[in-house]
């Protein structure tokens, strides 16, 4: 696979802005502690595999830090691509990073970018749809409502679905569903 | 006494409400008062946040607004919900740009995020009231050898959660020990259950869960205690498939922390709907 080497300054700015009030992503010195402690990298990266089949938070940080949007998107350019969707959001990388880089937030941004391109995994899209339609990730069902009653629980307070839809439409979420 | 707004979350409220039943029992017994509010999905810090971070911030902030309007703190029964609500609050409090953007959206629906209320995980409330928990215990759980699984989002990221040591958590162990159960140490205490990656990549999710389960088995636990509904479901529903896939036996029952405490307080397993668990109860649990 040939990787395009264009630096995208807009993308770089987005990445910088991930960190609250600082540009500390610059101080990543590629020590690999994030990848060493990542549970997914640990099970997904046997030796001698195509690099495109690897899940490597350190590489994601490097690619995004340099503004290589095209590389990140090339790696992430198929449905549910392992980069970035292999991240299980355990927040171990940012906990162990000696430079306090919010690696998980960077990967979240990469996920958000692929979502715009229609490449998010089906289960993630389905959840977003459910939230848009019912304001809950898991809509209320009659069988569960009965079970709640049997257990002596009050009914779940119904959320204002209209208001939620207005909010999400204004942000543009409906167009990505 | 503080009254909390109860945030049961989508998974507990609309899928496994028996966990809410034990939670409400325990909170009642230690005198913690709660009331309801029409909260939406938190939303999910692994799902909706990955889909669209702005939607995550805005919906989370809207939920916080509902509690702010009543001036009451939120108690959450779920790691994910706590993580989202605390995370949104953290980001909006420390990033004025994000706060401006979110408030511009909220203004269109007549709301404003101020950041005036606190969000607490039920584990922290139990820990704070540990003397009352202890006082309510009528039955020592000494037959149990417990592997504690606090889950990622209870304590990570540490800057948002401010709850426990992010890699060597101890709060859950301390509360479990208060019921007279034996807390068993195991190597992979801080390891994820692999829930989020199991969606798009079940093979990686399974490999992580296997690593976790092998460590728990090796330590000789006869029950796993959790404080997150996503982790609960993962352990409760995936062990059978895991056994088939790896030709090994994984059938350790799972208890929600509030189930363990309710049982230790003399509440019957019928009353809190424990028959809805999937993993067959082993003798250690059956005898409770
Ligand atoms: S642990 Fe931090 S500094 Fe080290 S490679 Fe990862 S992001 Fe960079
Ligand atoms: S948050 Fe994602 S990238 Fe970081 S350690 Fe966990 S799975 Fe790996």
Image (tube, coloured by chain):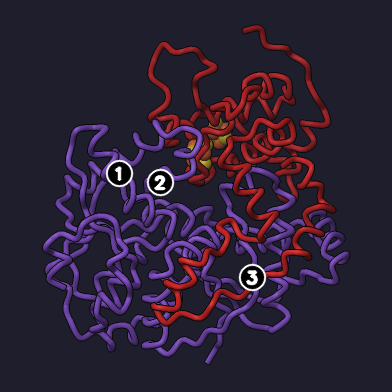
Residue A160 placement (x, y as % from top left): 72, 69
Q: Which residue does the image show at 32% across and 53% down from the upper left?
A: B236
Q: Which residue does the image show at 67% across and 77% down from the upper left?
A: B67
Name the colour assigned to chain A in the rendering.
Answer: red
Name the colour assigned to chain B in the rendering.
Answer: purple
Q: Is residue B27 above or below residue B111?
A: below
Dot 1 or dot 2, earlier in sequence: 2
Crowd rating for badge 2 (residues with CA inside 10 Å; few <14, some 14–19, many 20+): many
3D distance between C-alphas at marks 1 and 3: 33 Å
Quarter assignment of residue B69: bottom right
Residue B229 placement (x, y as % from top left): 43, 60
Residue A43 placement (x, y as % from top left): 38, 29
- The chain identifier of the residue carrying mark 1 reads B
The residue at label 2 has a CB less than 8 Å from ligand 2: yes
Quadrant the C terminus of chain B occupies: bottom left
SS at mark 3 in the image: loop
Residue bearing the label numbered 3:
B39
Crowd rating for badge 3 (residues with CA inside 10 Å; few <14, some 14–19, many 20+): many
Dot 3 or dot 2, earlier in sequence: 3
Residue bearing the label numbered 1:
B212
Number of the label disc, if any, that sits on residue B192: 2
Q: Is residue A126 above or below residue B124?
A: above
Q: Which residue does the image show at 42% across and 23% down from the upper left?
A: A45
Q: Is residue B55 above or below residue B29?
A: above
């Amino acid at each position: 696979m040939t990787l395009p080497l264009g630096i995208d300054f807009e993308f770089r700015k987005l990445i910088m802005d991930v960190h609250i009030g600082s540009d500390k992503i610059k101080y990543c010195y590629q020590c690999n502690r994030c990848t060493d402690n990542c549970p997914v990298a640990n099970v997904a990266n046997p030796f001698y595999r195509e690099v495109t089949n690897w899940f490597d938070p350190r590489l994601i940080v490097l690619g995004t830090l340099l503004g290589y949007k095209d590389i990140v998107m090339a790696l992430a350019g198929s449905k549910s691509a392992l980069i970035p969707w292999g991240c299980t959001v355990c927040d171990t990388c940012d906990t162990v990073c000696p430079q306090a880089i919010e690696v998980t937030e960077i990967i979240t941004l990469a996920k958000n970018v692929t979502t715009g391109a229609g490449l998010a995994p089906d289960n993630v899209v389905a959840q977003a749809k459910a939230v848009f339609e019912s304001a809950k990730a898991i809509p209320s069902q009659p069988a569960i409502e009965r079970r709640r009653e049997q257990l002596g629980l009050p009914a779940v307070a119904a959320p204002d679905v209209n208001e939620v839809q207005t909010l999400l439409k204004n942000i543009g979420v409906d167009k990505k569903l | 006494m503080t009254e909390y707004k109860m945030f049961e979350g989508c998974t507990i409220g609309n899928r496994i409400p028996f966990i809410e039943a034990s939670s409400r029992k325990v909170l009642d017994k230690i005198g913690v008062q709660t009331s309801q509010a029409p909260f939406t999905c938190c939303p999910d810090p692994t799902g909706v946040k990955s889909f669209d971070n702005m939607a995550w911030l805005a919906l989370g902030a809207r939920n916080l607004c509902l509690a702010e309007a009543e001036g009451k703190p939120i108690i959450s029964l779920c790691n994910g919900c706590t993580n989202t609500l605390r995370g949104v609050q953290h980001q909006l409090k420390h990033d004025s740009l994000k706060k401006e953007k979110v408030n511009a959206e909220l203004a269109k629906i007549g709301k404003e995020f101020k950041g005036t209320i606190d969000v607490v995980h039920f584990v922290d409330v139990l820990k704070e009231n540990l003397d009352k928990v202890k006082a309510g215990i009528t039955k020592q759980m000494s037959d149990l050898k417990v592997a504690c699984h606090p889950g990622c989002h209870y304590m990570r990221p540490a800057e948002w959660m401010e709850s426990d040591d992010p890699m060597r958590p101890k709060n859950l162990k301390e509360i479990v020990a208060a019921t007279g159960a034996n807390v068993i140490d195991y190597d992979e205490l801080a390891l994820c259950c692999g829930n989020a990656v199991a969606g798009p990549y079940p093979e990686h999710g399974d490999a992580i869960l296997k690593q976790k389960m092998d460590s728990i088995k090796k330590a000789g636990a006869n029950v796993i205690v959790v404080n997150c509904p996503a982790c609960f479901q993962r352990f409760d529903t995936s062990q059978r498939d895991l056994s088939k896939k790896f030709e090994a036996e994984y059938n350790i029952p799972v208890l929600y922390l509030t189930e363990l405490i309710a049982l230790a307080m003399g509440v019957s397993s019928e009353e809190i709907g424990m028959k809805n668990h999937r993993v067959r109860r082993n003798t250690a649990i059956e005898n409770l």
